[in-house]
Image: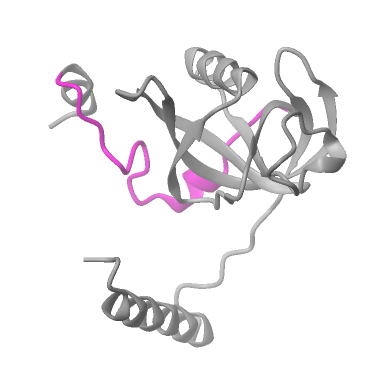
Amino acid sequence: MSNEERRENGSFSVIADFEGDEENLLNIKVDEVLAVLPLRNMVLFPGVFMPVSIGRRSSLRLIREANRKNAYIAVVCQKNVETEVPAFEDLYHIGSIAKIIRILEMPDQSTTVILQGVKRMKLDEIVETEPYLTGHVTPLVDELPDDKDKEFLAAVDACKDVTVRYIQSSEALP
């Protein structure tokens, strides 16, 4: 099924536009100033898909405008979840550049957005606070290990083993 056919029948691929080409996923071109979405108790990592419930009116406007423009956004975590209107000093400065995959209007009238982390970034400063936060960002360069690096492969295998053991021991996960 093509992407066009998926859109027409309402389904979507969790893989989005990623088709195994890590170089294209990591080497995106973004503006120096991006809309900034602060998250409470959540961290979005590059390459990860994550549903985020949108609560603030400013965040809802940010998500809708960025989606309409097909623009990347900056996603950072708040230092204190109680802060309703975070300023630069209330945010962690390392986060992810993200792509909006889908906006879902939920039956309880809330809005959830599916984000895909694309690349790490540093938030240098907030340049606007209205109608939502926008900030100057610097994309960070990640050095990927060689896919034949024995130490890296051993670390990946160890992570997989720990994850499988955790899932098997957890009663909450089927």
Image quarter where the N terminus lies is top left
Residue drawn at x 72%, y 31% as measured from the top left: 84
**Quadrant assignment, res 166:** bottom left
Q: Residue at x 52, y 44 (%)?
A: 117
**Residue plotted at (60% across, 50% down):** 41
Residue 32 % position (x, y): 75, 29
Whether residue 67 sits left or right of residue 59 in the image: it is: left
Which quadrant: the C terminus? bottom left
* Residue 101 placement (x, y as % from top left): 40, 31
Badge count: 0
In the rendered structure, the answer to whether residue 128 lies left or right of residue 66 reads right
Q: Is residue 11 above or below residue 51?
A: above
* Residue segment shown in magenta: 9-31
Q: Is residue 22 above or below residue 64?
A: below
Q: Picture coordinates of residue 135 (x, y %)?
A: 78, 29
Residue 20 is a magenta residue: yes
What residue appears at the point 30 percent right and 42 percent down from the top-left corner? 14
Q: Is residue 110 magenta?
A: no
The image shows residue 151 at horizontal and vertical percentages of 52, 86
Name the magenta segment's main secondary structure.
loop
Where is residue 127, by image quadrant?
A: top right
Closest to the observer, 165 or 70: 165
Horizontally, residue 31 falls left or right of residue 70, namely right
Q: Quadrant of residue 16?
A: top left
